[in-house]
C-alpha cells in the first residue's frame, strides 16, 4: 500500500525496518526529520532534526536507530515504541556522533558486530564507529561524495563504499586500507549489495545506467581451499563431522577482527553456518564427492561457468550419481566469440563517436541510452582490451585525459 496520511509533505530519502516485532516498525528519514511508523502507516513517533535526515538504519541486534543528518552529525536514537493503540507514548533518547565535516548521507550497521556502524559523507570519507565509546576511524580515498555503503554478511571487517567519483572501494576496516578499487562504473555509484547466499558475489548500480556484477573470488581463497581439502578427504573416508567446519564456516567475529591476516580466515555469518549443516547432512547420506564440492564452489563463486566445470569433472568422477553430475546448459562462450562481439560493439561506438546525441548501445535487455562522453570512455576501454593502443590514445585525447593517452 501507500502511506498517504500526511506523515511527510517533503522529500523522503531513506527507510529501514526494525528487526523486532516481525518488522512492524518502520523508520523514514527526509526533509522533515524522522518518522517512526507502524506497519499500518500510523505515526508512532516523530523526531525533529535541524537539517534533513538522509539516511536511517536500525541496528539488527537491538532497538537502536542510527540517522545521517545534513548538519554533519550522526544521531543514535534509543527507541521505546508501544503497541498500536497503547496509552503509553513512544519515547526516545539521543546520542550524537561528531567527526564528519560535511553532511552525512548514509549509515549502515555491521550485521556481525553489534556496536560497529559505517557512515558516508559529502566530505569524501567513510567512517567506522564504535558506538559503545563514540570513537571512529576515517577511511580515505574517495574524491567525491560517498553514497553507497555495505557490510559483508560473512567477514566482520570487510566493507564496501561507492561514490560520485564512480569508484567502489573494498575496505579492510581494521587497517583502514582499501584492498581493492573498482573503476568499472563511469558515473556516480549509489548502491552496493552482496548476494544473500554467495558472500563473494556483488551487485552495484550507478547513474551510468548500468547494474554490474563482480566477484571477490580471490579474497575467499584462504577459506575455500582448506574447505575443499577437508570435504575431499572426508568424502573419501565417508566420514564427515559438523565439527570439521568449525574453523572455516563457524568463525567467531571477535577472533576474525583481531586476526593479523590480510585475507579472511573464516566466515562468521548465518550463510556459512547453513552451508556447514548442508555439507554434514549430505555426507551423512553418502552424497557423491562432486555434490559436496559443488556446494562449496557454489557458495563462494558466481554461478556463471559452473555448469561447464561440473559437467567436465563429472565425466571423470566415478562417485557421481548416474556416472556424472547433471547440469543445465553450458554458459561459457569461446574466446573468439567474445572478441567478435567486442569488435562489433566497438565498431558501432566508433561510427558514432563524433555525435553529440545520446545513443542506444548493447544487445537485448542490456540495451541502454548512453551520452557521448560515456560512449567514448566505453570505446576506449574496449580498444584497450583488444590491444588497439593507438585508437585508445586518440579516444582519451578526445576525452581530455592526456595523462592516460601518453
Image: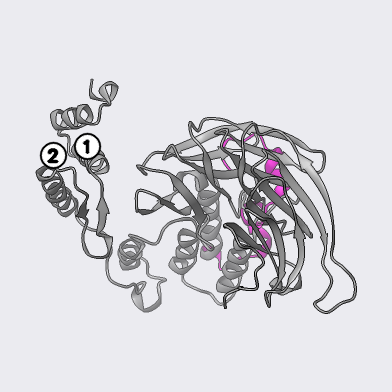
Which quadrant holds the N terminus? bottom right
Q: Residue at x 67, y 50 (%)?
A: 110
User: What range of the chain is rendered magenta?
Assistant: 236-264
**Mark 1, residues whose alpha carbon is within 10 Å: few (<14), some, or many (≥20)?**
many
Residue tagged by mark 2?
A: 354
Q: Which quadrant holds residue 73?
A: top right
Q: Residue at x 78, y 53 (%)?
A: 77
Considering every residue shown, the one lying at the far right of the view is 88
Query: Could you tell which of marks 2 and 1 lies nearer the N-terminus?
Result: 2
Where is residue 382? Give x, y as percent. Answer: 21, 41
Q: Nearer the viewer, mark 2 or mark 1?
A: 2
Q: Is residue 80 left or right of residue 43?
A: right
Q: Is residue 366 left or right of residue 98?
A: left
Which quadrant holds the C terminus? top left
**Mark 2, residues whose alpha carbon is within 10 Å: few (<14), some, or many (≥20)?**
few
Q: Residue at x 61, y 73 (%)?
A: 4
Residue 14 visible in rendering? yes
Q: Which quadrant holds residue 133?
A: top right
Residue tagged by mark 1?
A: 380
Where is residue 277? Give x, y as percent. Answer: 62, 68
Is residue 86 depicted above or below 376 in this figure?
Answer: below
* Disc 2 secondary structure class: loop
Q: Residue at x 16, y 53 (%)?
A: 341
Is residue 160 depicted above or below 78 in this figure?
Answer: above
Is 237 magenta? The answer is yes
Amino acid at each position: 500500500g501507500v502511506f498517504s496520511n500526511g506523515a511527510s509533505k517533503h522529500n523522503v530519502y531513506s527507510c529501514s525496518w526494525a528487526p523486532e516485532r516481525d518488522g512492524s516498525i518502520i523508520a523514514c528519514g527526509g526533509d522533515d526529520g524522522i518518522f517512526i511508523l507502524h506497519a499500518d502507516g500510523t505515526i508512532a513517533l516523530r523526531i525533529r532534526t535541524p537539517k534533513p535526515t538522509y539516511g536511517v538504519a536500525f541496528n539488527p541486534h537491538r532497538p537502536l536507530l542510527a540517522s545521517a543528518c545534513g548538519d554533519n552529525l550522526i544521531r543514535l536514537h534509543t527507541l521505546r515504541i508501544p503497541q498500536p493503540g497503547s496509552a503509553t507514548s513512544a519515547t526516545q533518547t539521543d546520542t550524537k556522533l561528531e567527526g564528519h565535516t560535511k553532511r552525512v548521507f548514509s549509515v549502515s550497521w555491521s550485521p556481525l558486530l553489534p556496536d560497529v556502524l559505517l557512515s558516508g559523507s559529502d566530505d569524501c570519507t567513510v567512517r567506522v564507529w564504535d558506538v559503545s565509546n563514540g570513537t571512529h576511524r576515517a577511511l580515505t580515498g574517495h574524491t567525491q561524495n560517498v553514497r553507497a555503503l555495505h557490510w559483508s554478511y560473512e567477514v566482520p571487517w570487510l566493507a564496501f563504499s561507492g561514490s560520485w567519483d564512480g569508484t567502489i572501494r573494498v575496505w579492510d576496516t581494521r587497517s583502514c586500507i582499501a584492498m581493492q578499487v573498482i573503476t568499472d562504473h563511469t558515473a556516480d555509484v549509489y548502491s552496493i549489495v552482496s548476494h544473500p547466499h554467495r558472500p563473494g558475489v556483488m551487485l552495484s548500480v550507478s547513474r551510468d545506467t548500468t547494474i554490474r556484477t563482480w566477484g571477490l573470488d580471490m579474497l575467499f581463497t584462504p577459506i575455500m581451499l582448506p574447505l575443499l581439502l577437508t570435504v575431499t578427504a572426508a568424502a573419501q573416508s565417508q566420514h564427515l563431522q559438523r565439527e570439521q567446519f568449525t574453523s572455516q564456516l563457524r568463525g567467531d567475529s571477535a577472533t576474525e577482527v583481531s586476526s593479523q591476516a590480510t585475507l579472511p580466515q573464516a566466515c562468521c555469518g548465518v550463510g556459512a553456518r547453513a552451508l556447514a549443516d548442508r555439507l554434514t547432512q549430505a555426507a551423512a547420506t553418502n552424497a557423491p564427492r562432486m555434490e559436496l564440492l559443488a556446494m562449496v564452489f557454489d557458495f563462494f563463486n558466481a554461478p556463471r561457468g559452473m555448469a561447464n566445470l561440473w559437467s567436465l569433472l563429472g565425466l571423470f568422477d566415478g562417485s557421481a550419481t548416474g556416472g556424472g553430475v547433471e547440469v543445465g546448459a553450458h554458459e561459457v562462450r569461446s574466446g573468439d566469440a567474445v572478441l567478435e562481439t567486442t569488435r562489433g560493439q566497438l565498431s558501432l561506438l566508433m561510427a558514432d563517436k563524433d555525435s553529440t546525441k545520446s545513443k542506444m548501445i548493447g544487445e537485448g535487455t542490456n540495451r541502454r541510452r548512453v551520452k557521448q562522453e560515456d560512449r567514448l570512455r566505453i570505446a576506449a576501454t574496449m580498444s584497450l582490451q583488444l590491444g588497439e593502443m593507438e585508437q585508445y590514445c586518440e579516444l582519451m585525447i578526445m576525452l581530455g585525459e592526456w595523462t592516460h593517452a601518453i
